[in-house]
Amino acid sequence: MTYLPYIVGAYAVFGVVLAWDGLAPLLKYQRLLRAIRQRAVREAGKRERGAA
Amino acid sequence: MNPILLWFHQLGSPPVFHRFAGRWMPWAFGLSLLLLGVGLWGALFQVPADYQQGDSYRILFIHVPCAWMSLFVYTTMAIQAGIALVWRIKLCEILAMACAPIGAAFTAITLATGSIWGRPMWGTWWDWDPRLTSELVLLFLYLGVIALDASIEDRRRGARAAGFLALIGLINLPIIHYSVEWWNSLHQGRTVMLLGPSKMDRSMILPLLATVAAMQVWFAGSLLSRARTLLVEREQGKAWTADIAKADA
């Protein structure tokens, strides 16, 4: 009996879950920084309009 | 003040922790991938097939380290939650909550790879065996901690409530560990022991130790990464996060 499909399946699950664990927080971190930058731009725009 | 104690106190400051995490996280992931490469090369191509299980036992080189990590991460989460509940240290709340998805990932891998190994070896994908059932309860505990933390709008109250649940769930760890001794379990007993002789051949232990070390270092990297993200998320109104966002552009 060949066990190859079981081995490939198990290692695939391992790889996918580990990749998700590594990448998900990095992507969220980048999204957060982008949101903070966009908020800063909006607030600067508001201040400029208020001064004008 | 003792320099080590001083360093710990300084690390409690969000910008200092952010810098620390950003500096060490890539090293941790890099070292982990290197160790994982060595371990998996040995597990898949170097060690001989088992005389009873054939090649299917190669799954255990990922199943066993993840199973150990599922318990280790839970212990770390509970310790951090306990410190956060007693001393109200914000960073410990964040670290405890950052542990939960990592532990859930390790537990999910443990259950999935165990199930895949069990199909050809036991003839079934799943059995309500004490070890398997208590490990499934562990996954539900991790998911419960994540859900409870997310369900309360006040992030600090949410983390404290979830931390309390994490502490209650500690009762499950000895049940998982000793389930194979306390009950007549389908799951095999301990094969590798930290103290005392192991039932595994030396040639098989070395790749296993490499993957165990890889998962430990991966956990360190992932914890730093997730804690850094949670910290920025909670402090996004503060000036230091605005400076970081500007510097990153």
Image (spheres, coloured by chain):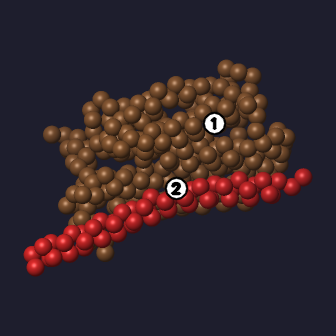
The brown chain is B
For mark 2, name the chain.
A
Left or right: B9 as drawn, with respect to A15: left
The colour with which the image depicts chain A is red
In terms of secondary structure, where does tag 2 sit?
helix
Q: Nearer the viewer, residue B188 or A45?
A: A45
From this viewpoint, which residue is outermost toward the top?
B182
Tell me if residue B193 can be seen: no
Q: Position of residue B190 (x, y in %)?
A: 67, 32
At horizontal 66% and vertical 43% (from top left) the residue drawn is B111
Disc 1 marks which residue? B136
Tell me if residue B161 can be seen: yes
Note whether B145 is above or below B20 in the view shown: above
**Number of numbered callouts drawn:** 2
Q: Nearer the viewer, residue B46 or B108?
A: B108
Q: Position of residue B11 (x, y in %)?
A: 26, 48
Marking on residue B113: none
Q: Nearer the viewer, residue B49 or A13?
A: A13
Quadrant for the C terminus of chain A in the image: bottom left
Same chain under badges 2 and 1? The reply is: no
Q: Amino acid at mark 1?
A: Leu
Q: Amino acid at mark 2?
A: Asp
At horizontal 59% and vertical 43% (from top left) the residue drawn is B107
Disc 2 marks which residue? A21
At horizontal 82% and vertical 54% (from top left) the residue drawn is A3
